[in-house]
Amino acid sequence: MHDQPKFVPLRQSTFFSDSRSARPLVAGTVARGQLRDDVLLYTGKANGKDADMFPFLIDGKVMSRGQERFDIYCSPCHGRTGQGDGMIVRRGYRRPPTYHQDRLRDAPVGHFFDVITNGFGAMPDYAAQIRPDDRWAIIAYVRALQLSEHATINDVPPTDRDKLR
């Protein structure tokens, strides 16, 4: 069992006529789980531009997941409320912009997806750390933070206003 005949990948071999030890990939082959045929879900783009819609329904479960992922990955820099005053900023790192400025409140959701995926300025990319559906959940939560910062009592359903008073 110690000495097993085997072929080492990418090494020369006499087994095949082209001297390869393995067969080349078949054209058009896609690795399992890597098809990524939903352009909006995986790129944040619609018709080549940053999308202004989410690729799936946003409900309470998605928002809860978004808050959880935001608290883990985003709040160290952006702070728990999105003001850009996270713990590492308090320790001397560069301050990110607040989510509550007009430029980011007016930005399409696809912009946020692109920034999380590819990074921007001092922000690194998080494509390897955060799955695409979790990126969308984070963006939904960021939108909720933005709405909460600029909400008025008229934005609350009349049946729930008494709970706030």
Image: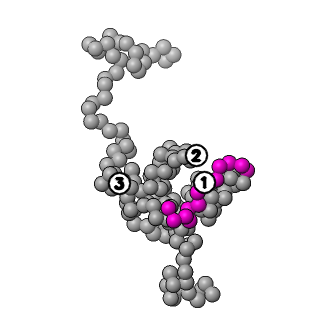
Q: Residue at x 62, y 58 (%)?
A: 84
The residue where tag 3 is placed is 49
Residue 133, given in percent of the width and then of the height, sits at 44, 55
Instruction: Answer whether residue 56 is visible to the viewer in this image.
Output: no
Which stretch did the figure color magenta? 91-103
**Which numbered dot is residue 96?**
1
Query: In what quadrant of the picture does the C terminus appear?
Result: bottom right
Of 118 and 120, the residue lying toward us: 120
For marks 1 and 3, give the CA distance: 24 Å
Instruction: Return the x and y of residue 16 as percentages of the image width and height.
Output: 29, 15
CB contact under 8 Å: marks 1 and 2: yes
Marks 3/2: CA distance? Answer: 23 Å
Between 144 and 6, which is closer to the camera in this rendering? 144
Element on which disc 2 rests: loop
Indicate the secondary structure of the residue bearing disc 1. Answer: loop
Residue tagged 2: 122
Vertical comparison of 117 with 59: above or below: above
CA gap, disc 1 and disc 2: 8 Å
Q: Residue furthest top?
A: 14
Q: Earlier in the sequence, mark 1 or mark 3?
A: 3
Where is residue 96? Give x, y as percent.
60, 54
Q: Amino acid at mark 2?
A: Ala
Image check: 124 left or right of 87?
A: left
Instruction: Identify residue type, mark 1.
Output: Pro
Reply yes or no: does residue 5 show up in magenta.
no
Q: Secondary structure at mark 3?
A: strand
Q: Which amino acid type corresponds to the residue marked 3 in the rendered image?
A: Lys
Local crowd size for mark 3, using a 10 Å CA cut-off: few (<14), some (14–19), many (≥20): few
- Dividing the picture into quadrants, the one containing residue 22 is top left
- Residue 21 in the image, given as x and y percentages of width and height: 35, 17
